[in-house]
Image (spheres, rainbow, N blue to C red):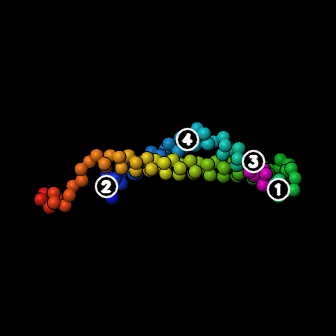
């Protein structure tokens, strides 16, 4: 793999990760908050056998669930963004390499 190709893939990965982070900030904050807190409350209600009261322990567990939900959705957004960015960079590299002539061994030996 040539240095130009490696650089193209690295740039694509970084651009994709940045776009994934932006998409997370725009579309992922509210769902992360919602699913994290809802998941913890459902889990605690199953453990308690019924509805839970708003005690300090339940509130602390809800905050931990919110942080975990935000982290999980953020990680997925960034990883998927970098995968799509790498795939797009690979496609661009393949398209651009079809139009360039490759140097043969004879030309390298003569120079």
Q: Earlier in the sequence, mark 2 or mark 3?
A: 2
Question: Which circle's residue, 4 or 3, is located before the other in the chain?
Answer: 4
Name the secondary structure under disc 4: helix
Looking at marks 3 and 1 on the same chain, the residue that comes earlier in the sequence is marked by 3
Q: Is residue 94 left or right of residue 19?
A: left
**Cα–Cα gap, marks 2 and 4:** 30 Å
Q: Alpha carbon of mark 2 to alpha carbon of mark 3: how far?
A: 48 Å
Q: Dot 1, how many residues are within 10 Å of its Cα: few (below 14), some (14-19), or many (20+)?
A: few
The residue beneath circle 1 is 46
Judging from the image, what secondary structure is the residue with disc 3 in? Answer: helix
Indicate the position of residue 20 as horizontal and vertical percent values: 52, 45
SS of the residue under disc 2: helix
Report if the CB atoms under discs 1 and 2 are less than 8 Å apart: no
Residue annotated with mark 4: 23
Query: Would you say residue 109 is visible in this rendering?
Result: yes
Q: Which residues are magenta?
A: 39-43
Q: Earlier in the sequence, mark 4 or mark 1?
A: 4
68 sits left or right of 57 in the view: left
Verify CB contact (< 8 Å) between mark 2 and mark 4: no
Question: In the image, residue 4 lies at what x, y percent?
Answer: 31, 52
Q: Which mark is residue 70?
A: none
What quarter of the picture does the N terminus occupy? bottom left
Of the numbered discs in the image, which one, if any, rests on residue 3? 2
């Amino acid at each position: 793999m040539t240095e130009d190709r490696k650089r193209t893939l690295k740039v694509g990965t970084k651009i994709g990760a940045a776009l994934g982070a932006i998409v997370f900030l725009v579309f992922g904050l509210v769902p992360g908050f919602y699913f994290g807190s809802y998941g913890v409350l459902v889990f605690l209600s199953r453990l308690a056998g019924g509805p839970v009261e708003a005690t300090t322990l339940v509130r602390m567990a809800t905050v931990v669930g919110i942080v975990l939900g935000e982290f999980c959705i953020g990680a997925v957004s960034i990883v998927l963004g970098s995968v799509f960015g790498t795939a797009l960079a690979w496609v661009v590299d393949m398209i651009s390499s079809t139009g360039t002539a490759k140097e043969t061994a004879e030309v390298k030996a003569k120079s």
